[in-house]
Image: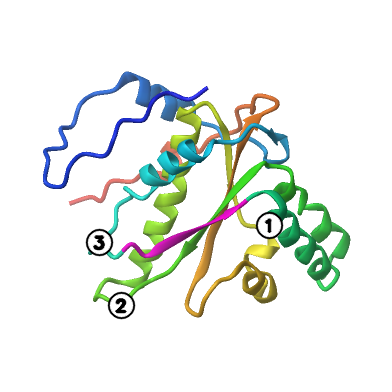
Amino acid sequence: MAAVVPPAPDFGAPCPITPSAETLALLAGRRSSAAQTLVAPGPSEQQLADILRIAARAPDHGKLEPWRFIILEGAAKASLVASFRRLAAKQPSPDKAAAVLTKLSAPPLTVAVISAPKPGGKPVWEQELSAGAVCTLMLVAAEAMGFGANWITDWYGYDPEALAALGLKAGEKLAGFVHLGTASEPPLERVRPDLAAIVTRPSI
């Protein structure tokens, strides 16, 4: 299914900037797949390692690596979903809270991207943005391999008990659950932003 991923350049090696029509085509048409439509097979161990390696090349001011990954699959993932189901009963809309857990349970593989800011003189906001960039690159890498992907949070991405069950430490936040798998149906194009409404040029 997936294309071969080149090895990482050696430290200090030149990283030439080269045009890529394939990359532009991928980005111009990239579309998240609904999490509930993602089925097996998901990425293999090697493919997942390549996806994470590509994601970890996100801009990172100060080389702090202010993020980490929690891999959710199989029995461990099912156990986590079960714990979230118990917590759903405490939510303002228990039935709705339980229903959205399908987004987590359906995909064969999920990567929880954890924003973990570190001391080092760099603004925490920049470190949190870096975690978002990691999620974006993960989506692009997965789609380039032929997989469907979706980056979401939902209530269990903010509930303190759910985050504790996931294993977050003090000072950490969930940047998102990145769900990976084979798209059982093609995602449909959605309305896109009107650039004329959001692009400005300051006057002199």
Q: Describe residue 201's horizontal placement relative to residue 165 as left or right.
A: left
Q: Which amino acid, mark 2?
A: Pro
Q: Describe residue 43's horizontal placement relative to residue 64 as left or right.
A: right
Q: Earlier in the sequence, mark 1 or mark 3?
A: 3
Residue extending furthest top? 21
Q: Residue at (83%, 68%) from the top-left corner?
A: 86
Q: Position of residue 181 (x, y in %)?
A: 62, 35
In the image, is residue 37 part of the stretch drawn in magenta?
no
Residue 47 vertical placement versus 203 (above, below): above
Q: Residue at (33%, 64%) from the top-left corner?
A: 126
Magenta region, residue range:
65-72
Q: Position of residue 4 (x, y in %)?
A: 39, 25
Q: Describe residue 172's horizontal placement relative to residue 76 as left or right.
A: left
Instruction: Point out the frontmost of discs 1 and 3.
Output: 1
For mark 3, what is the residue? 63
Q: Earlier in the sequence, mark 3 or mark 2?
A: 3
Tag count: 3
Classify 10 Å Cα crowding around label 2: few (below 14), some (14-19), many (20 and above): few
For mark 1, what is the residue? 76
Q: Which amino acid, mark 1?
A: Ala
Is disc 1 placed on a helix, strand or loop? helix
Q: Residue at (29%, 57%) from the top-left corner?
A: 60
Numbered circle sitting on residue 119: 2
Disc 1 to disc 3: CB gap under 8 Å: no
Give the Cα separation between the discs numbered 3 and 2.
11 Å
Residue 24 vertical placement versus 75 (above, below): above
